[in-house]
Amino acid sequence: MANSPQAKKRARQNEKRFAVNKARRSRIRTFLRKAEEAIASGNKEAAAEAVRAAQPELMRGVTKGVYHKNTASRKISRLTARVKALG
């Protein structure tokens, strides 16, 4: 357990940051799940719209430090490739 005042403060900050990042990750996963479901439905227009909605959420996760830039780019790339394959 943290003993010094500085360590106690860092522990509090970590708890807050964990909660915020958890909410962000959950929000991003929701957008990704909607995109996956739209792709699975076979409707290209709905799938493209869902992927367009997911892209800024993923990139926002990158700027907030939840995801690495390459991870987000890879996810977006794979989703768009799957939407394109629906054609």
Image (spheres, rainbow, N blue to C red):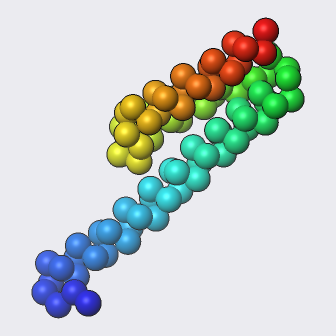
Q: Nearer the viewer, residue 77 or 23?
A: 77
- The residue shown at (37%, 62%) is 17
Q: Is residue 56 above or below residue 1?
A: above
| Quadrant assignment for the C terminus | top right
Report whether residue 11 is seen. yes
Residue 56 in the image: state x and y as whole percent: 52, 29
Q: Is residue 17 above or below residue 40?
A: below
Q: Nearer the viewer, residue 59 or 36?
A: 36
Residue 70 in the image: state x and y as whole percent: 39, 31
Figure quadrant of residue 54: top right
- The residue shown at (18%, 79%) is 7
Q: Is residue 30 above or below residue 53?
A: below
Q: Is residue 9 found left or right of 21 in the rendered image?
A: left
- The residue shown at (85%, 23%) is 42
**Total number of numbered labels?**
0
- The residue shown at (70%, 41%) is 33
Residue 37 in the image: state x and y as whole percent: 78, 36
Figure quadrant of residue 81: top right
**Residue at the outermost top position:** 87
Report whether residue 49 is seen. no
Q: Is residue 16 found left or right of 30 in the rendered image?
A: left
Residue 15 in the image: state x and y as whole percent: 38, 71
| Quadrant assignment for the N terminus | bottom left
